[in-house]
Image: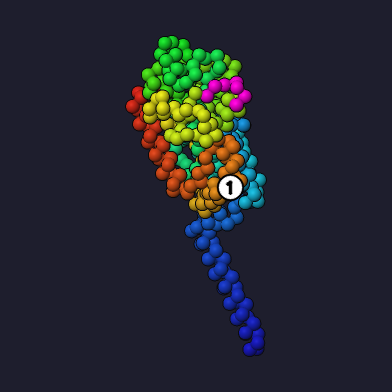
Amino acid sequence: MFLLWVRMHIVRTAERLATFLAASVSVFVWAFPGLAQAQIWPSRPIRILVPFQAGGSSDLSGRLVAQRMQEVLGQPVVVENRAGAGGTIATEAVAKAAPDGYTFLLAVGGPVVIAPLLQKTGYHPIRDFVAVSNVNSNPQVLLINPSVQAASVRELVALAKARPGKLNISTAGQGSLIELSALMFNQMAKIELAIVPYKGGMIATAAVLSAEVEATFANPSDAIPQVRAGKLRALGVTSAAAFAPMPDVPLMNDAVPGFVVETWNGILAPVGTSPDIVYRISAIVQDMARDPAMRQRMADMGTTPIGDTPEQYRAFLEQQFAFWGRFVRDAGIKRSP
């Protein structure tokens, strides 16, 4: 009888312990859903949306990040090129995506911080995204068709002043950083280049190649092959200091004082994404920036690796949004309806 009582007591104790543990786990999961999510993440393929067509600097940067994420996380990471509307289509899609850690944006300055200043977008650059890490940055290159009778930025400015509104400059679309660079060039050099928008930087460069337009600002990945092949002429780079991949190209700042513009590629997630996931991806990007082989690959693309923390990247986004906001306001650029 005593042995039977002991056995029953052990069973009841075990049942109470099991119930307590189950309840404790439930409370833990309810109280810390982000941590629970991060513990089982990733369990399926991840997407990185790139706002421009394949082959450009942003696309190549996105693919480098995707490759490293896939190696580290052990799940497929798919790059999805969703071009259009100056990059705002992909950007808005990520802003409205589920914050489950399976959709990220290869963020580019134009659609993220500039487009909302110039037109109505379905997202706000700070409120609707979580900053993960800035991947890399690069200046732009002022390119002209060889048929244009200008051998320097100053000569192009003189030609534009002699023919106001007659020379065309292509851009990557409304709200793109290339368009803002063209507007800034017009304003600071006191010229009137006619701005012609295209659906992406590579297409804008192709328009100069075919002589549809006379000039463009291009990312180094688009500019360097054409300049080396002698198909386009580089007049200036928009960096603050000499640009190592194109050391013989003068600074725009020399001819147009104060003209310094750099574009960048970063990783953003929809607001609400678990901090555990955000910091894990940020760590991957930071590790990339320290990897000598990856640094060389980025240098070959004409970009400089960054790899910062979520806090640093958010502060950078806020600074960029404020800077371009002041430029748009001071330049009197009207917002599209």
Q: Which residues are magenta?
A: 228-234
Foreground residue among 252 and 76: 252
Residue 254 locus on image (x, y percent): 41, 27
Which residue sits at x=61%, y=80%?
Answer: 10
Label 1 secondary element: helix
Picture layout, residue 62 above or below residue 230: below
Which residue sits at x=52%, y=36%?
Answer: 244
Picture layout, residue 170 above or below residue 42: above
Q: Is residue 243 visible?
A: yes
Residue 163 locus on image (x, y percent): 43, 10
Residue 80 locus on image (x, y percent): 61, 36
Foreground residue among 252 and 278: 252
Foreground residue among 42 and 184: 184
On-image quarter of the C terminus: top left
Residue labelled with disc 1: 292
Q: Is residue 233 magenta?
A: yes
Q: Is residue 324 magenta?
A: no
Foreground residue among 15 and 52: 52
On-image quarter of the N terminus: bottom right
Q: Amino acid at mark 1?
A: Pro
Q: What's the image's color scheme?
A: rainbow
Residue 119 locus on image (x, y percent): 43, 27
Q: Is residue 149 left or right of 9 when viewed as pictured?
A: left
